Amino acid sequence: MTGTNRSPLWLTALAVLAVAPALVPGAATAQTYPTRPVSLIVPAPPGGGTDIFARQLAELVSTAVGQRFVVENRGGAGGTLGTTQVVAAQPDGYTLGFIWNSPLTTSPHSLTLAYTPDSYRAVMSIGFSSYVLCARADFPAATGAELVAHLKANPSRYTYGNDGVGGTMRLAAERIFRRIDTRVRSVPFAGAGETARAFLGGHIDFYGGSLPPILPHVQAGTAKCLMLTSADANPALPQAAGLQSLGLGEEETVLWWGLIAPARTNPQILSRLEAVFTEAARSDAFRQIMERQGATPRVLGAEATQRLIRSELAALGTVAQAIGLQRQAQ
Amino acid sequence: MQSFSLLLDGLATAITPTNLLLCFVGCLWGTAVGVLPGLGPLAGMALLLPLTYSLDPTGAVIMLAGIFYGAMYGGSTTSILLRIPGEAASIITCIDGHEMARRGRGGAALTIAAFGSFVGGTVSILGLMVAAPLLANAMLAIGPAAEAVLMAMALLVVAAVSSGPAVKTLAMITLGLVFATIGLDQLTAFPRFMFGRLELAEGMSFVALAIGLFGVSELLLSLDDAITERPRTPRLVDLLPTRAEVREAAPATLRGSLIGFAFGIVPGVSHIVSTFASYAVEKRLSRHPERFGQGAVAGLAGPETANNATTGSAMIPLLVLGIPAIPSTAILLSALQIHGVQPGPLMLSEHPGVFWGLVASMYVGNLLLLVLNLPLVGLFVALLRTPMTVLAPAVLLICVIGVFSVSASTFDLWVMVTAGAAGYGLRKFGYDVAPLLLAIVLGDRLEVSVRRALTISDGDYSTFVQGPAAQVFLGIFVLVGALQLGARALGWRRGG
Amino acid sequence: MRSLHQWQGDAAVGGLLAAVGALVIHLAQALPVGTWREPGPGAQPLVLGVALVVLGLLAALRAWRVRDATAATIGEPRAVATLGLLGGFVLLLEPVGFLLTAPAFLIALIAALGGGWRRAALIGLPLGLGAWAVFDRVLGVPLPPGLLPL
């Protein structure tokens, strides 16, 4: 009896001894974090909106914390490669990911990925940018409501360019078309720039994508944007209707950006990061950068961002299923 | 001549000490990243992008553009000396440029390439000033259907310029097209030949393939024979081209400038397509087509000029439409946007200072590059004096770093090693790897543009012969083909 | 190292290409072909697979008919050693780190190519460390740290 009783005690003691050294420096790390440069993985090639925001935030946070935050671009596979790297990294706070929503909420519907919303922790998010649906100046509709009526009356007649099946714009648009019960033929392109070129050349009827590539042509009067995929209207595009005004408010799908960390990162480190990044994102300098990129600042904390990810993932899953998009064996 | 006076204003902007320094830094850095295999203009610009946040928009864009065309300059160096394409646009340069180096004309080849780059760059800037809006419209006219026609024709040109037996070239092109299908299908997100590797979702890394197929296989081959034909080390006088070489290079350079600028309208792959279009033209026009592949001067001068001439036209969609046509100009776009300058139809009226400052700085930069590169020719050639036992390991190390720097993935390194071994076997038995690599680049765009065009036309195949752009391309092609057949029928064909 | 005639290698590559084509056809079976009006992701691979089989066989046939009897070798010791060491370098790069593997790779390869161990060490060590300093530290291209706490 005594022998069997003693043995677990003895084991426990050993286990405590073994774990203790691992715990103590851990606690110390959380107090003094960060003591060395932090990698900020951006799962996109350099030069896009995500990259610009990440680099600007990194600079602001580096100054505030007194330790370098180094942006590393890990593009590929629609952002899922870099995101996978973030998720698989040591949860020590020295590898973080600055991501846009697509690898988290869109790609899982077409790719078999090594992560779920449980594999990472959202730290915060900085704001969003609506996708737009634009027509050329001579298109016979002048408002969002007219566009909806026109599309409903002519199913399968028009083509719209988008950023590909794995892309969020496609799902955002299909979500709306499905709700208003019509069909617009999808022509996927490799990015908003290519979509814009085909649209301006008259090869497709609608431009579907982010705002910046098309904005100069709206200002020049060659294109008119009639519909946004956000609930609210955008002051930069008074002609475009927000979904709320069309009675489609709950179908909002936007492009947003945020910070994630591997799931088991120390909570103290996470709240420190949330605080410093939130402060940087709220600064005037950063808000200005966002507005120049056509984005709307809207800082959300860890909880709200994580909730957003889960609900968006579920909603887009329904759309993906409806348009016959399914995850294939790779 | 209002644009002339604006250009003078731009020149005044470009030669302020700060901007001149920024232009110089950009050109120097661009040359460096162009010379290092793997590190192309894209990586070079990305690394310095944060620096530009603190500059004014004109200075920022002057420096980044300097990196862009500086890298195009530098890309030819490793192609000529080591047969490693610094970037995709110098694949063709490898063929005759490296042959020249093997024959002890490496210095002359580098000098010709530098002058060609200078002329091509300058012509394209002139074109940018004069014809920008016109070319922008031509670009827009190329929709998916016309793009498909263009890509198919480009592949036929690749097949036509290759010197090997037709069946082998066609087999290599087909293999390249097969490799191009690897990854997620762009139109249905269906995974193809990915074997569960997420790294393959966007296809195999082009840099890894290019460095493996060309660079690694070249080193393996040169280590191969006991009696290796070592590139002869040139003496100082050999650094300059001979009179005969100049006479052959000059017309090729002029033609290359025009071809490069005109092909700048090809979406996405302009800098690549222009090089082998120029190569094909030179081979057709040459009195000695059999010399192509054996160190023909025109086969180096034409393409090397053409790839630099596209840099000017690559700026056109960016500046006139606000749309980056190739990835490098996407970085320029974001640099401008950070400073609140939105390129597009209104840029000329809203920010004339930035526009003309940039154009003028490109003139200045081209001159700087020439001055910078000519003295370097001697230095680079001296590197060839290094014995192969040391040169090969050092070059392999640089290749590994270059490939790793693109995506930080060991997977890409394995692609490079495998491609090296495969290229070694293929080339040993007379299978040319240039068509293979070009087909990989073009195949992807060929397939998606065919399918995009069919989606747009709702399954109507006549879309490929409709529309002005497709008809122009087909017309040129039929005309050239008919001339070719006619010439052959009349017995005018000059061999090769 | 194997000695053979040029045409034998030529024909073997042709046969290999045909085999790759057959593999492509086999793998493409799993992909939807679509219709004429709307070709699916499997259409092009299928066409290309068939073309590759035909062209590979034609190339092999041509090699056999031309019968270029020039002597050729495959797998020379120096080339094999280079490829092997390169593979080893890539294998150990991430787990062990650049700073340790790069000098080792350079020294081993220079020696294997007949440069002698003394020279290999004198050149390989500074070259490997220098490359790390220039790329990782000066140019900001992150290289794998591996075992060393960098």
Image (cartoon, rainbow, N blue to C red):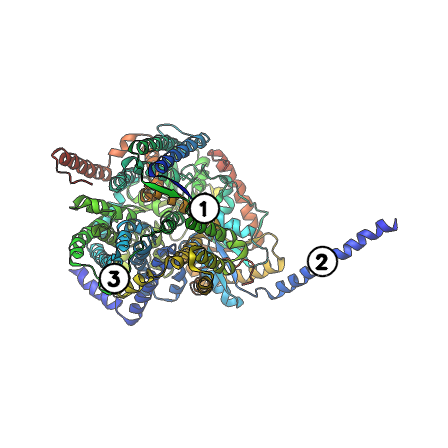
| Residue behind mark 3 | B366
| Chain bearing mark 2 | A
SS category of the residue bearing label 2? helix
Task: Tell me where residue B7 sits by quadrant.
Answer: bottom left
Q: Position of residue C51 (x, y in %)?
A: 35, 31
How far separated are the C-alphas under marks 3 and 2?
A: 65 Å
Pick whichever, B235 or B418, lies toward us: B235
SS category of the residue bearing label 1? helix
Do discs 3 and 2 belong to a common subunit?
no
Pick whichever, B72 or A162, lies toward us: B72
Q: Position of residue B441 (x, y in %)?
A: 34, 44
| Residue behind mark 1 | A78
Q: Which mark is residue A141?
A: none
* Side (left or right) of B204 relative to B82: right
* Side (left or right) of B76 relative to A296: left
| Residue behind mark 2 | A18
